[in-house]
């Protein structure tokens, strides 16, 4: 509900969840408490996935993308819901996701990823690709099984039809 309407009230959320408003208020006394709980749940999922990925493996980025895409709306919330970074606890957890990914990207630069772009740019391009894939799946434009290929091919090859090595169209 909050992905569809970030301004939804607790009453709207309760109705969409099929529970009474009082029941929801007992567990989450404020809208802020609900949002914080959802964000922490999403961050727990991301941390769990990251702990399962062997960041030293040749296919680490493929494994990570496939696992994150499978979580879909449960973590799309992190990228789509405004203002999470203003909560100090959440901001620390959100920023903690970046260093292992930046290390992986830096290791892959010059072999599988471009060296001429900053690692932070590639990381945020990856995040954007994940977000676009989740939105496209939700809109029915992209099959979930195709999503990893779309994200990874865009990350590794971009959208140009020119082979960078020869400067000729593919």
Image (cartoon, grey):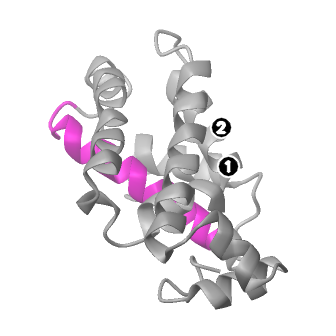
Q: Is residue 45 visible?
A: yes
In the drawing, what numbered circle is on residue 95?
A: none
The answer to whether the residue labelled 1 contacts the one labelled 2, judged by CB atoms less than 8 Å apart, is yes
- Secondary structure category for the residue under label 1: helix
Q: Residue furthest right?
A: 18
Q: Quadrant of residue 109?
A: top left
The residue that mark 1 highlights is 71
Percent coordinates x, y for residue 46 in the rendering: 54, 39
- How many residues crowd around disc 2 within 10 Å: few (fewer than 14), some, or many (20 or more)? some
Looking at the picture, tell me which residue is in the foreground, 68 or 12. Answer: 12
Percent coordinates x, y for residue 114 in the rendering: 26, 34
In which quadrant is the N terminus drawn? bottom right
The residue that mark 2 highlights is 67
- Residue positioned 72% across, 84% down in the render: 21
Looking at the picture, tell me which residue is in the foreground, 134 or 79. Answer: 79
Q: Nearer the viewer, mark 1 or mark 2?
A: 1
Which portion, as a residue range, is magenta? 115-136
When the figure is inspected, residue 67 is found, relative to residue 104, above or below; the finding is below
Percent coordinates x, y for residue 166 in the rendering: 30, 39
Q: Is residue 83 magenta?
A: no
- How many residues crowd around disc 1 within 10 Å: few (fewer than 14), some, or many (20 or more)? some
Q: Main secondary structure of the magenta part?
A: helix
Q: Residue furthest top?
A: 56
- Residue positioned 35% across, 49% down in the render: 90
Q: Quadrant of residue 160?
A: bottom left
Q: Is residue 169 visible?
A: no
Q: Is residue 119 left or right of residue 21?
A: left
Percent coordinates x, y for residue 125 in the rendering: 34, 52
Q: Is residue 122 magenta?
A: yes
């Amino acid at each position: 509900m909050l992905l569809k309407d970030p301004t939804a009230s607790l009453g709207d959320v309760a109705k969409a969840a099929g529970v009474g408003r009082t029941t929801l208020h007992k567990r989450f006394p404020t809208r802020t408490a609900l949002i914080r709980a959802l964000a922490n749940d999403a961050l727990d999922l991301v941390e769990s996935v990251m702990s399962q990925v062997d960041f030293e493996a040749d296919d680490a980025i493929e494994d990570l993308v496939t696992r994150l895409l499978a979580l879909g709306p449960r973590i799309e919330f992190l990228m789509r819901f405004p203002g999470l970074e203003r909560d100090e606890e959440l901001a620390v957890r959100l920023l903690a996701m970046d260093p292992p990914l930046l290390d992986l990207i830096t290791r892959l630069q010059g072999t599988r990823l471009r060296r001429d772009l900053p690692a932070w740019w590639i990381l945020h391009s990856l995040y954007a690709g994940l977000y676009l894939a989740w939105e496209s799946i939700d809109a029915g434009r992209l099959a979930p099984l195709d999503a990893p290929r779309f994200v990874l091919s865009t990350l590794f090859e971009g959208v140009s039809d020119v082979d960078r090595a020869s400067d000729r169209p593919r």
